[in-house]
Structures are given as structure tokens and as C-alpha cells.
Image (cartoon, rainbow, N blue to C red):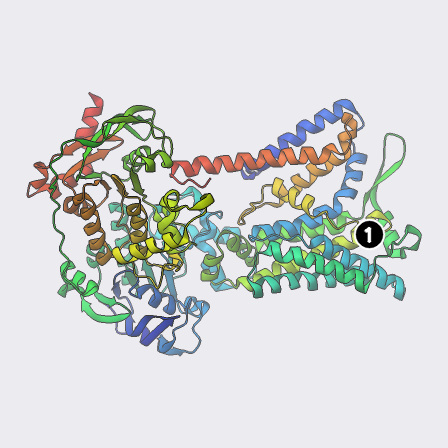
Amino acid sequence: MKFLKKIDNTQRFLIVIIVIYCILVQSRNSAFLSLATLFTMFRSAAGTIILSMGVLMVMISGGIDVSFPAIAIFGGYTSLRICMACGIQSMFLTFAISIAIGIVLGVGNAVLINILKLEPFIITLSTASVYFGLMTILVGTKNVGATDLPAQFKTLSKMKLITTTNQYGGEIGLSVFIIPVAICVVLTWFILRKTLIGKGIFAMGCNNEAARRAGFNVNLLRIFIFGYAGFLAGVMGVIYIAGTNSVNPVSLVGTEMSVIACVVIGGASPTGGYGTIFGTLLGVILYYLFSQTLVYLGLSASWQSFFMGIVLLISLITTSWQRRVQNRKNFIYTE
Amino acid sequence: MAGTNNIVEAEHISKSYVGVQALDDVSITIKEGEIKCLAGENGCGKSTFVKIIAGVENATSGTIRIGGKEMTKHTAKDAIDAGIQVIFQDLSLFNAMSVADNIAMNKLIKEGKPLTNQKEIRKIASDALALIGVDIPLDAQIQELSIANRQLIAICRALALDAKLLFMDEPTTALTKNEVDSLLNIVMGLKKRGIAVVFISHKLDEVMRIADSITVIRDGHKIGDFAASEIDSKKLAYYMTGREVDYQQYERKNDSEDALLEVKNLTKKGNFEDMSLKLRKGDILGLTGLLGAGRTELAFSIFGMNKPDSGEIYVEGKKVTINNPDDAIDLGIGLVPEERAIQGLFLSKSVNENVAAAILKRIKGFLGSIDSNRSRELSRKAIDQFRIKVYNEDTVISTLSGGNQQKALIARWAATGPKIFILDTPTVGIDIGSKAEIYEYIQQFAAEGTGVILISDEVEEIVANCNRVIVMFDGHKVKEYTEEEMKAPDIKEQINRLVESGKPGKEAAQE
């Protein structure tokens, strides 16, 4: 009951859509509701979940980041090439290199925003290009095939925690990705809900000036937020490479808008100050539901972006409509 | 009585911004348990002084001692650590966050514990709320609360920190009488515990009731410290403005009986019911009543922003339908709204752009582009005519004081040459000097033949400016005072009683 009270309108709306959609798909394909589907979906969604946590935090603070795919591929791909060149087989080092790069680039975003006092959107739009360009110059963009991947990537790719069989008798397992994903989600939840930094992030998203007056160092907070987003991008970079089991370093670029769409669908306020982890997860779930199961309804996967767009529009219309009615009551005409 | 230990000693504080000397050699001492009133017109530098003490801005020169210790580099954190709390006029709340979070926030920051505990946050919040004896749900978001409750939350937030010195910038503007009384009681309670409170308030009579001392600042200079007992509001107005302020009651000189504006049986469900009024040339028609009586809603309906359900509006004898502000402007109606910052001004734009906003149609040149020379010429004229204190017409309007912003807004509508001019509580949060000027302009408009509707809470304001008054209560017209009735010597008391009780209106509604 307490949980029901806590979920907001957006979340309720998403849950209803997800449930109805699942029933629809199940009626067409009785094999849909199964552990196997869940495991498969999770494996493809893992990277997006991690990235969405970073986007969520940035958006709550009133900012926006479009450079995270560039950071993720910079971290992951550089780490891969270093491991290949030096024969490193340590999982820990692989992540450490990627994460370190991610944090440095993320902090770079924040420092630029702090110094130039420009919109995070403009800054990260430029740095996305700068970072990706820098990587192609320094590291290159050579495709790395599955057979050339170092052992730790193969392990990461194949290791499963629990296994189950799908409708054709094939073995499907819960990817070990669940561990980094769970760590990232819980860590983000912990920072946002249980720490002073988290309060500061919400506060600066609500009212930057008031946060400053209250005694928060908003510049430091911003460095933390973008550094953390970089950290998550670093983790994702490695998982992405392991997940695709081969890498074309150009492929990740351009995916930022779908991640941001997931977060916005999840109810995070584009102007800052509000957003939930649960909502964001629902947004990601919806995205992957559409991307993976539309075939069951006889629709091609191209319909995914159409449906995502519709859901996004509906949720934006309802919230803005509510605000408009509220404002009208107070005779504020913003439109 | 105030203690003997000084909490803050600010000596020879000066502050200059580019080209403007905001404070010049101001020294103020605040004692333990003292209730001080910092009085002065808007833009006199009192807010700057508070910001310097709060560490939000740095003084250009001068020394600040807190608890006897000289502060070399005084930051916001130093101030908070020293127990100095400011409730800014904009409240500085976090609108999408909960009541509990907002109240506890500053305390959490001061304690600096990296982890937060929801139970502890709720306890801090409920303790602070208990201190002022109000009950507001801890989980409510600030944006769901009324302005009055938000004010209380801001006060609770400061109380939660066990402040030693509390600045309150215009704390009573949005509070009802009862809330003000309970606030003043709380302040007395704080005083007993040795906490000093500095009010920065325009509602002088309320605050002076409990103040020990009053410090007046004018144009960046300290005029003096006065004991509350040795000063009255007239004297204070003199110190603040440097001139005698006396309001002349307005008298209509125009003898035309034709209605400029006539409203017949206008009804909007939930806002107002069966409202009729008649406005002639040179009338200043007062519209008063408690908050929520339907005054603003009625004004918006006349201005085409709140479509009425039924009833008729006539302008100069012709029946009109006003669907939007554009229609209203074409009919010669101007409106200065209640919330000038939200509803009226383009805060980040220049004075020039703000003044020209309502007459763009008239100053557009070839191909619909705006003739910037004409617009500038007009703004310069407005700045001159309305004595707007500003460096030039390109100054961003948000940097102006409330009084000057309001004058710019009035200038905007004056430029349209309105036949019917509605002003909704035009002097809220505005200092005495600007207030007198605004009254002067309003009366001048009317004398030149404009019909003015003046909406106001302040009965003094209504009585000084209006030749006729309508009192509203709960969406109904309770009584309309004629020009003859307005001349009664006890007119203020009559209106006051009616506004509070609303008696005739309710009875009328039941019949």
C-alpha cells in the first residue's frame, strides 16, 4: 500500500501501458511471458539502463547531457585496445581504464559548463563531437571481431548466473551484466535518495540560486554529477562491447536521444528538480518491450520509434496540461 | 530586553556595483535578542546590506565582526555557521521537493553529514512546524502550497537551524492578519531565547509593534538608529523618503455621465457572480475585498483572459465581446496585473522592450519590423515622465527595484493611451516614495479623462485614490459606495468592517 502511494501519475500510466501491452503480446504468442524473454530483454537493455541512470541524475540537476555515448565508446573502446595491445586479461583493469576515462571526460563537461556558464546542452553537444573525434585520432576506429576480443570480454559476454530453456529448447541465461547494472542502479538510488549530495542535486534542479544560497557549492555538485555520468558511461562502454561481442566503435554514437527519451518518458522533469529511478526503469522497459516484441504483433521493428514517440507525447501532454490548468487558476498564461 | 552581547557588528560597509554606489559607509550593530527593523525605500541598499551580512555578496570595503570575531572572507557558509539566516523575499524554496526536505535542507547542509536519514529529516521538519504551531503535510510538494504556507515553510527552515540572527525580507506581505499575529508571537518567542530578528518590512505598523529599534537607510546611507518608541509611521516615512508624504483624497472633476465601461450581470462560475459596474470618464473606481473575493478574476474577464459564463460588457455604450488581451487593447483597455514579475514583465528584457511591449503594433515599420528608434524615444520619454531610476533604457528590468519595475509597467500601458485602465494591487511590495508617485500618476490619468479601476487590499489606498468603491466578498458585490458616501469621515472604518465581515453580501446571496 505504501508503495502504491509513492508511485506518481507517470509511473501509473506507464505501468498500465506495459501491462496492457504485455497482455496483448501474450495473446498473440503464448511463449512471451517467460523467464527466457525476460533474460534476453535484460541483456540487450543492460547498457541503456546504466546510461539512463546518468541521464536521470543530470536531468534532475536541471541539466542535459548528450555526450555520454561518445564517452562510453571512448572509454570502452580505448580500454579494449589497450587490453589487446598490452595483453591485459584482468576484468578489473578493463573496467578501471574505461571508468577512469569516463570520469575524466565527464568532469571535463562539468568544468567547461562551470567556466563558460553556458547551457549544458550546447557544451555536451560540442564535447560529444570533440571526444569522439579525439578517440578516432588517438585510438582509431578499427573494427574488432569476436575472435579478436580479449578473454575477459568473452567471459563477460557468455557468463550466466541462472539458466532456463526457451520455447525451442535452447538454453537462455541471465547475463552476468545484472551485477554491474544492479550496482549502478542501487548506487544511483543511494546517491539521489540517501545522501546530502542527492538533496543538493534535486535542490539545484529546482532552483539553482536558492541551492547556492542554502550553502551548496553548485559548481562542485555539477562536477560530481557529470563525473558520475562519466563513470556510468565508462561501465557501459565495457558492457556494450561485451554485449555486442565485437565492436564497431562508430555504432554507439547517435543513441543518446533514445536514452534521453526513456528518462523523459519515465517522468523526469526536463527543467530539473524531479525524476525517479523507478520511472526511468519503466521507460527503459517500455523501450525494449517495443523494440523486441513488435514482431509478435506482426509489426516491424520500425514501429518502435513511432510508439515511443506516441507514449512520450501523451505523457508530455498530460503533464503540461495539468500544469496549464493549475497556472490558469492562478492567471498565469505561459503559452 | 535586548542583551548586551553583539551578534553582528558591521562597520563602515560600502558596496559599489559597476557605476552604482549601493551602500556608503553603513555601520549597524545587532544585539542578542534584539528585534530590529531595517527600513528604507526599495533600492535604498537595505537588501544589499542583508546580502553582505549573509555572505552572498562581498562588501567593497568595511569590516564585519560576528560574535566579536572579525571575518576576513565572509562566505554564505560562514554566515550560516555563525547562525545567520536570511529569509529572502523570493523565499528560495525548492518547489518540486517536499515540505520536509525544504525545512531540513539548510540544517542538513550545516551539519554536513554525507548521508541523510528520512526519519531525521521528518523530525527536523515536524519540530520546526510545531514551533510555529502550524500543521502542513510533510510530504506535500512546495508547489502545491499556497504562498502563505510557503512563507511559513521558509520561516521553519530558518528556525530548524537554531538561528542566532534571522533576517526576514518582507515576511508579512502574503500573510493574513492571523498569520501575521502568530508570526509576531513566534518572533517574540525567539527573542526570549536570545535570538535576534531583523525585519525588512513595508508593513511598518505591524512590525513596529514588537521592534526594539529601527534603522533607516536612504540612498545607500544610514539615516540613523531610532528607538521604536520614539518614532511614528509619519516620521518614519519622512526619514525613508526625505520628504513629507501626504496623500490627497481624489476628487472627480469630470462632469460627463456617459459610461466608458459598463459591466452587466457578469458571472463566471467559481470566480464571481452577477457583477455589475459602471465606469465614467475620470472615475477611479476602487475594487476591494479579501483575497479570493473575485476581484482579480473580474479584472481578467474584462481584459479578455478569463471568459465569463454569462453577462454583458459595454464599452462606450457598444456591446463588446472581449476574447483576448488583443481585443481589450484595441478597445482601449489596459491592465497592470497583480503579480508583476510573473504576469506583467519580461524580466530578462530591457526597460525599452518592456515599455514598448503593448504598442508594438503602432511602432512597427516597413514589413512589420519594429522601429527601434521610435521604441527608444518612447522609453526615454517614459523613463523621464515616470521618474524610473535606471541607468538607461537598455538596462535589464530585473535589476530594477520593485517600485521602478512597477512604474515601467505602468508606463507600458500609459503608452497605449488607454481609455480604461485597470490596476491590480499596483503598490504591493513597493516603498512609500514610489507609492506616492504611483498614486500621483493614477490620479493624473483619471484627471485627463481615463476611467481607472483600482484593485487593492489597502483601504487607505482605496480611500485616498477612489471616488467610488465596490466591496466584494466571496464573488459577490457587497456594496457600492457612491461619491457622496466616500466623503464620510469614518469611511475607512466602514469599508474595513465590510471587507472583513462581508455580511451584506452573504445575506444578499441567500435571498
Instruction: Classify residue A288 as left or right of residue B282.
Output: right
Which chain's residue wears label 1? A
- Judge whether residue A159 can be spotted in this image: no
Residue closest to the eye, A48 or B301: B301
Q: Is residue B72 positioned above or below B202 on the image?
A: below
Q: Residue at x 85, y 33 (%)?
A: A166
Residue closest to the eye, B462 or B409: B409
- x then y, percent, for residue B120: 49, 54
Instruction: Classify residue B55 as left or right of residue B387.
Output: right
User: Label 1 amino acid?
Assistant: Ile
- x then y, percent, for residue A119: 57, 56
Q: Secondary structure at mark 1?
A: helix
Q: Residue at x 8, y 37 (%)?
A: B485
Farthest-out residue, left: B489
The quarter of the rendered structure image containing the N terminus of chain A is: top right
- Judge whether residue A156 can be spotted in this image: yes
Farthest-out residue, right: A147
Residue A165 sits in quarter: top right
Residue B496 sits in quarter: top left
Q: Residue beneath label 1, please?
A: A241
Instruction: Classify residue B437 as left or right of residue A118.
Output: left
Farthest-out residue, front: B366
Category of crowding for the residue at label 1, using alpha-carbon neighbours closer than 10 angstroms: few (below 14), some (14–19), many (at least 20): many
Q: Residue at x 53, y 37 (%)?
A: A319
- x then y, percent, for residue B410: 29, 49
